[in-house]
Image: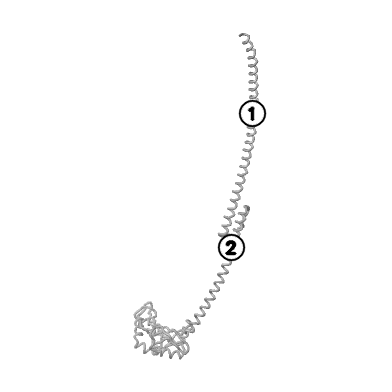
Amino acid sequence: MSTVSDLDGFVKTSPAAAALLDEAFGSGRISHHGLWAYRGQLYQVAAIPLVFQNGEQTGPVEGILVMGERITNEFAQEMGKIHNCEVSFIANNGLAASSVNNVQHIRLMLDWEDIPTSTFDMCVGDQSFRSDCESLVDPASNTTAATVVIQRSHQDSQQFISGVSRRLALIMIGGMVVAAAISFLLSSAISKPVNELARGAKSVSRGDLDLSLQIASRDEFGELVIAFNHMVGQIGASRKDLQQANEELEQRVARRTHMLTRANEELQREVSERKRAEKEADAANHAKSDFLANMSHEIRSPMTAIMGFSE
């Protein structure tokens, strides 16, 4: 924590300090925050209005309590550990705090004036760093108080990428193994009832209509087995009905055949009797003809003699 004497000159002369104090005096908020760069150091500042209360009446702001916390190398190193990078704060064209070593300090400040963009590469010895710059704005005065430089070694980045790639590869391999195991289990769980249904269908096709598959589960395959058993039962019932209908039809055909046989026999007997009657009638006709012929001859012979005598 910085003392009042550390920031006394800055508070008296800096526009940023004046803006923070004006904001603290003019608003009703309990505290106000700022970011100040002073004598090559960077401070996080809080301004708290001092108000004295008399009974239930609250008086006006009598003063401002200003507290500043200097951003140190330890703070930068802690941020670097958290985010796995190097952090540097540059204020008033000087290095206010940093997590990098002295060699990187010197190289960073030497290259600072020639940095063309917010992203640049910096080489220190045999190491290469990718650096990004961001401006830190004082919220009270809305002015740039400092610049934070975030650096990451290309070697560390490559190691991080390699580690991530290895972890991703392990995750992918593990996922493939788990997927293969799940696929095997699912295929077994699916293929077993399907094979049971296939064997049942073959048995039914061979004429085994008394087959009834066991219901192993209550899922879709269980419903399929229930439907299959119901279908086989309906086929068996239909087959029994068909057999009964065939038996009844055979019995009816047999009765009809027997009746036709008897009718045919009676017809044959009647035909035989008619033929015999016809033969007897023919014989009677022949005997009658012969009798008439003989009688005519017998009668005609005396008549001829009598006629001859009479002449």
- Residue 46 shows up from this direction: no
The residue labelled by disc 1 is: 275
Along the viewing direction, whichever of 64 and 240 lies nearer the viewer? 240
Helix, strand or loop status at disc 2: helix
Q: Position of residue 48 (x, y in %)?
A: 39, 82
The residue labelled by disc 2 is: 191
Vertical placement of 142 versus 185: above or below?
A: below
Of callouts 2 and 1, which one flags the residue occurring earlier in the amino acid sequence? Answer: 2
Quadrant including the C terminus: top right
Q: Position of residue 12 (x, y in %)?
A: 35, 88
Along the viewing direction, whichever of 32 and 202 lies nearer the viewer? 202
Question: Which quadrant holds residue 220?
Answer: bottom right
Which circle, 2 or 1, is nearer the viewer? 1
Task: Give the crowd class for mark 2: few <14, some 14-19, many >=20 residues within 10 Å.
Answer: few
| Residue in the image at 63% along x and 38% along y | 257
Q: How is the image coloured?
A: one colour
Question: Which quadrant holds residue 109?
Answer: bottom left
| Residue in the image at 57% along x and 65% along y | 187
Q: Amino acid at mark 1?
A: Lys
Q: Position of residue 141 (x, y in %)?
A: 35, 82
Q: Residue furthest top?
A: 310
Badge 2 vs badge 1, beta-carbon distance below 8 Å? no
Q: Amino acid at mark 2?
A: Ser
Task: Give the crowd class for mark 1: few <14, some 14-19, many >=20 residues within 10 Å.
Answer: few
Vertical placement of 173 versus 302: above or below?
A: below
Vertical placement of 269 versus 241: above or below?
A: above
Question: Which quadrant holds residue 196?
Answer: bottom right
Helix, strand or loop status at disc 1: helix
Query: What is the CA distance from the residue labelled 2 to the residue labelled 1?
Result: 81 Å
Along the viewing direction, whichever of 301 and 218 lies nearer the viewer? 301
